[in-house]
Image: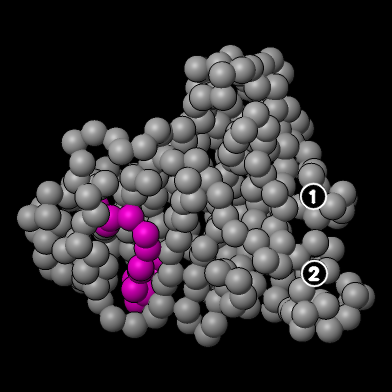
Amino acid sequence: MRVLLAFFVASGAALLSVSVTAAALSVATNSPKPLSARVTSYDIDADLNTDKKSLDATEVLTYKNVTGQPLSSIPFHLYLDAFRPQSTFTSETHFTGGIRDSESEDDYPSEKLGGITVSKITADSYGDLSREMHFTAPDDGNAEDHTVAEIHLPHPLAAGDTITFHLAFHDQFPLSIAHNGYKRDFIMGGQWYPKPGVFWHGAWNCHQYHSTTEFFSDFGTFTVYLTVPDRYVVGASGVPTGSRTTPTVLKRLTSLAKTLATSHLRPALTSPSLTAPSPHQWVQSKCTC
C-alpha cells in the first residue's frame, strides 16, 4: 500500500511537456471502478516559491476509519522535518558520511536545512485541532525528532466513519537529498505534505524518518493544484488534468487541453479563483492510487 505523490519543477522548456504522461495512462486510472480500498482522499492547493525554495499549501484530507474500532488519535508523517540538526535521520546519517560532519547544531549547513510547519489544522465536526497536535517519537524516543505528529481527537472517530481535516502548512526544501530538495533551478518534492500513518495489524504503523527508511501509506485519491513561475516545467506523478497561465502562452495551453481531451482527461478548470497572477502558471494533476 505504498503511495508516493511527488513532483519536480525545472526552469526551461514550455509547459506543454507535462502532457507527455497523458499518452501512457495506467489501467487503474482508466478503470470504471476502484481497484483498491480507498482510505484517504487529498485535495491540495500549493504555491511553490522557487526563489526561496519553499512551498505554502492548504490540504483537505478525508480519512475513512476502516480499522473496525473507534480511533481517539491519528498520527501524521511530517517527513521534511528529517532535515533538521536534531532529527533521528541526521543523527543516523552522521555515522555514515551523511549530511553534516558534526553533532553540533551550529555546524549544520544552512542550505541543507529543511522542514514542514503545520500552522493550522481543523476538522469538520471537531473544530480547531491545532493545539491537539503533538510530536511523538515511537521508534527511539527522540523528543527533538519532529517527523511524526499525533493528533488527539476530542471525541473518537467511530468505525466506518470519516473525518475531514483542513490543514495549512509551509515547506522549506533543503539542498537535494533523499528524494527531496533543490539543485540550482531544479526542485523536487518527494514526501512534502502531511499524511496519516497506516492502521495495520491492530496498531498504527507510523515510523519516524530514518536513514534507511521507506514510505508506507493507505491507498487514496489526490487532486493537486501547483502554482509555479511560468518558465518552469512541471513533472509529477498522476495525470495532468488542466493548467492556466498568462495570455502569452494561452495557445500552448489550448493545445495541451486538446491533448488531454483526446486522452479522456478533464481539461483545465475555468474558475477565476484558480487563476494565478502573471507571470505564474498553475497546473492541476489528478492521481488515483
Magenta segment: does it hold 237? Answer: yes
In the rendered structure, which disc, 2 or 1, sits on the residue that comes first in sequence? 2
**Nearer to me, 267 or 270:** 267
The correct choice, above or below, for 197 with respect to 93 in the image is: above
Q: Which residue is mark 2?
A: 92
| SS for callout 2 | helix
- Residue 237 in percent (x, y) is at 37, 59
- Which residue type does callout 1 highlight? Asp
Given residues 37 and 42, the one toward you in this image is: 37
Q: Position of residue 238 (x, y in %)?
A: 33, 55
- From where the camera sits, is residue 190 visible? yes
Real-space Cα separation, disc 2 to disc 1, in angstroms: 13 Å
Q: Which residues are magenta?
A: 228-241
Residue 223 belongs to magenta span: no
Q: Which residue is mark 1?
A: 139
Q: Amino acid at mark 2?
A: Glu
Q: Position of residue 118 (x, y in %)?
A: 66, 46
Residue at figure coordinates x 24%, y 54% from the top left: 26
